[in-house]
Image: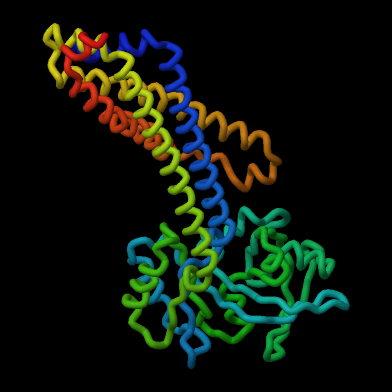
Amino acid sequence: MLPVKIALRFLKSSKMQTILIVLGLGIGIAVQIFVGLLLQNLQASFIDSIAGNSSHITVLPGEDQVVIVEWEGMVSEIEDIDGIKTVSVTADSPAFLKYGIKTNNILVRGVEFDNADRIYGIKDALYEGIMPANASQMIVGRELIEDMGLVLEDNVKLTSPEGINRTFWISGFYDLGLASLNERWVFMDLSSSQDMFGLNNSVTSIETQIEDIFAANEIAEDVTVALEDENVIVENWEDNNQELFSAIAAQGASSYMIQTFVLMSVIIGIASVLSISVVQKSRQIGILKAMGTKDRQSSLIFMFQGLFLGIGGAVAGMCLGVILYTGFISAISTSSASFLGSRYNLPFIFGSGLVAIISSVVASLLPALKSRKLDPIEVIRNG
């Protein structure tokens, strides 16, 4: 195709200019990808640390209720709702833990461990000992261990608010990564907690995790409609963390703004360079038009130049962006790197490259129109 051949010839005839354009475009796309990956990983890690190991939507007893009685049917209803990933019930109650001469105020959390583990990651958090295997065993957190001097496989006494005493065996130590939870939460089997606090078969909450945490409001409404029970209330993490949610939304908006400005600078730069190229190559274009090249073909020459520059810049930018992010992760401290993670959003990376190519073609429209209007007689006459 003639316009393609001429476009390549023009690019080869000004190798240094072509290299600089591709390099500039590549650096712009690399910055976009680096910033995008950094903010995406930061946001994902931040959300995971705050909401990853917690209940996204929680069903609690209503104002005049203390427990949820017919919870089995509610669990079945909730599990059938689109977007729900995990459902777990809890039987919680404050209690006093006594070990030696020390006594501490704790929160006993009776759970079905297989379901609760999908929310809190209890098995992964267990760093010593084993999960409770029977009704007399429980696990405690790191800060509580240090505060009270607890010993693995030792017996401790729990006292309920009603004065009921039970002796439990410490089967393991866990660390959920939050000191406020480690120093207060004690996990045991659901039936053990129900028996100690006289809950019969009742529970104190139904906790869930959802696929998309930003859809918590909508899914919480679906849960409310599905349950149709005035004896329970439905809470979600968005309502309880409005400031956090606003900060995450602002961070996402800032990422899009940065990427938009980078693309705008790329488009303006390419349009400017190709416009200058039209002036530089005006004599050659005039000769081509005089030899029978149509206006449409002369326009395509610069559009193909934009396409080739976009492809070169996109490939260079994607490679450089990934290298920059990988190098950044390798250079920072181990703790920071583990928090950020090294997740590479391939759709975002290739999408950025595709947007760069489209932007380059769009940027070539102005010089293409400019070349279309060149009068071959005037060009040749003026030299």
Q: Residue at x 37, y 37 (%)?
A: 351
Does the image show residue 88? no
Q: Residue 248's x, y, as percent?
A: 51, 58
Residue 290 location, quadrant: top left
Q: Residue at x 26, y 9 (%)?
A: 383
Q: Which of the two residues, 92 or 320, is positioned nearer the viewer here?
A: 320
From the viewer's perspective, tell me whether residue 332 is left or right of residue 104.
Answer: left
Does the image show residue 284? yes
Q: Residue 37's x, y, as percent?
A: 51, 41
**Residue placed farthest to the front in the image?**
382
Q: Residue at x 22, y 13 (%)?
A: 379
Image height of 21 relative to 5, above or below: below
Q: Residue at x 74, y 62 (%)?
A: 142
Q: Residue 292's x, y, as percent?
A: 11, 10
Q: Residue 24's x, y, as percent?
A: 47, 26
From the viewer's perspective, tell me whether residue 308 is left or right of residue 102.
Answer: left
Image height of 200 relative to 365, above or below: below
**Residue placed farthest to the bottom in the image?**
64
Image height of 271 relative to 61, above or below: above
From the viewer's perspective, tell me whether residue 209 is left or right of residue 222.
Answer: right
Q: Quadrant of the N terminus?
A: top left
From the viewer's perspective, tell me whether residue 25 is left or right of residue 324.
Answer: left
Image height of 2 relative to 30, above or below: above
